[in-house]
């Protein structure tokens, strides 16, 4: 929560404008979603509980219909439209989660939907959006170009543009996650949630703070797409010049006006996490919680891993989505394993003679390191006449094992140079 600016001594601060969404709006949205959106499970995590030092539970929106929370807001938004607007159809722009949420919501409500997606959108997400009933149009290389195309389509055809986060009905729909958390974990003290444009965090804050003002709400952004910290400092949405993160679900360059006002008023803190933390969190969710999540969905877990002793429990971390492209999952898991010390890359020099490489591999076997890749260089101006350079990528068991392997090689007389 950002403190209101102070005036002169003895003067009263200006009253805050009423928020665009109330807890009653969220309750009404919950009624609208009855029989449509699942009340997703709250799963305890012994591993995270031990790390954080307080009970941690995971709110599994990755198990929601369409694989993310987005169905909630999209359905509430379209359901609230008058018949005349529904007849014109709806249009949206998205790289994945919002696309699927709008497609299914429109299909359930008998509304025609068109979804613009970037040309490079993952094929599984494009296929799923079509399967949910939308007409998919591929346009642009980045979401901003896709967004402009969708808005132009809305102007030309009269279709209603469904914004992914900047509308009161969307925020109210996402806020039903907060009501479920209070029902499932009445003793909750901290809720940690990923933040992109801010619709989910704003909705949860409205639902929770008006019923339980003692609960702390912590938003999480990727360091390379963190528009909220400068916006909160400025007191108004600030657009970033560029965004870069593996977490495409929270890769948003400017906060929405509606969610920003709510987050500025009700959210206690917004933290940022690194790419290493995101990939490590995704790996942890897969290995320890048996949960497939996308990098954005793992961002609350990344925050817990980054500063584990700073959260009062019980803690609920919202896994906002699980729609991760298999190729992205593969790359992210490799990154996460490297960040967790499960891979070790080394360069070393040895005497270029028969059996030298075999002897090196024997040393690595004795150190219980699994060799993934070997590159053997004999012709380089940096090398002596009788030298060879070997680059190795090894699978290891963690940071201490990495240190032990490197130490064993040095003890055996090898010159480790990187």
Image (spheres, rainbow, N blue to C red):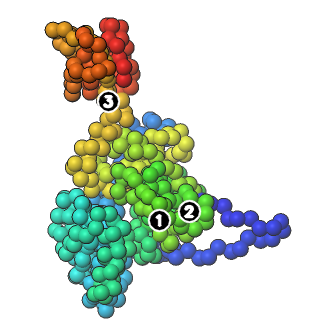
| 229 is higher (above) or lower (below) than 73 | above
**Residue 73 in picture, x, y percent from top left:** 37, 71
- In the picture of the structure, the residue carrying the numbered disc 1 is 254
Question: Callout 3: helix, strand or loop?
Answer: loop
Q: Nearer the viewer, residue 308 or 198?
A: 198
- In the picture of the structure, the residue carrying the numbered disc 2 is 231
**Which one is earlier in the sequence, the residue at label 1 or at label 3?**
1
| 52 is higher (above) or lower (below) than 192 | above
- Indicate which label's residue lies in the foreground, 1 or 3: 1
**Residue 46 in picture, x, y percent from top left:** 39, 38
- In the picture of the structure, the residue carrying the numbered disc 3 is 342
| 70 is higher (above) or lower (below) than 304 | below
| 329 is higher (above) or lower (below) than 79 | above
Mark 2 touching mark 3, by CB under 8 A? Answer: no
Q: CA distance from mark 1 to mark 2?
A: 8 Å
Residue 394: image quadrant is top left
Mark 1 touching mark 2, by CB under 8 A? Answer: yes
């Amino acid at each position: 929560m950002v403190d209101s600016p102070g005036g002169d001594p003895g003067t009263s601060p200006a009253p805050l404008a009423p928020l665009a969404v109330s807890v009653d709006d969220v309750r009404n949205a919950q009624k609208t979603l009855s029989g449509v959106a699942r009340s997703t499970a709250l799963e305890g995590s012994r591993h995270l509980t031990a790390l954080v030092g307080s009970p941690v539970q995971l709110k599994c929106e990755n198990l929601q219909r369409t694989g993310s929370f987005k169905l909630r807001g999209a359905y509430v938004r379209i359901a609230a439209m008058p018949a005349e607007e529904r007849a014109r159809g709806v249009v949206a722009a998205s790289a994945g989660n919002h696309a699927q949420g709008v497609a299914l919501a429109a299909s359930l409500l008998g509304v025609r939907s068109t979804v613009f997606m970037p040309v490079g959108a993952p094929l599984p997400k494009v296929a799923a959006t079509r399967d949910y009933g939308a007409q998919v149009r591929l346009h642009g290389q980045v979401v901003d170009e896709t967004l402009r195309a969708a808005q132009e389509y809305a102007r030309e055809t009269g279709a209603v543009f469904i914004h992914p986060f900047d509308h009161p009905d969307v925020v109210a729909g996402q806020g039903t996650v907060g009501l479920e958390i209070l029902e499932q974990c009445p003793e909750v003290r901290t809720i940690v949630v990923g933040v992109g444009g801010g619709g989910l965090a704003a909705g949860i804050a409205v639902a929770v703070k008006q019923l339980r003002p003692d609960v702390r709400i912590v938003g999480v952004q990727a360091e390379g797409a963190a528009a909220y910290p400068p916006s909160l400092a400025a007191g108004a949405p600030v657009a970033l010049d560029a965004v870069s993160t593996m977490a495409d679900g929270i890769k948003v360059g400017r906060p929405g006006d509606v969610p920003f006002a709510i987050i500025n008023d009700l959210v206690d803190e917004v933290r940022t996490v690194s790419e290493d933390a995101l990939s490590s969190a995704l790996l942890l969710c897969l290995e320890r919680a048996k949960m497939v999540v996308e990098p954005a969905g793992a961002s609350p877990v990344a925050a817990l891993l980054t500063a584990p002793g700073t959260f009062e429990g019980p803690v609920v971390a919202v896994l906002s989505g699980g729609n991760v492209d298999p190729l992205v999952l593969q790359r992210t898991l490799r990154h996460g394993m490297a960040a967790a010390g499960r891979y070790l890359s080394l360069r070393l020099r040895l005497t270029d003679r028969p059996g030298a490489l075999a002897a090196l591999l024997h040393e690595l076997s004795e150190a219980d390191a699994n060799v993934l890749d070997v590159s053997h260089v004999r012709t380089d101006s940096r090398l002596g006449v009788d030298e060879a350079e070997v680059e190795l990528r090894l699978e290891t068991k963690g940071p201490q094992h990495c240190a032990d392997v490197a130490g064993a090689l040095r003890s055996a007389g090898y010159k480790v140079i990187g």
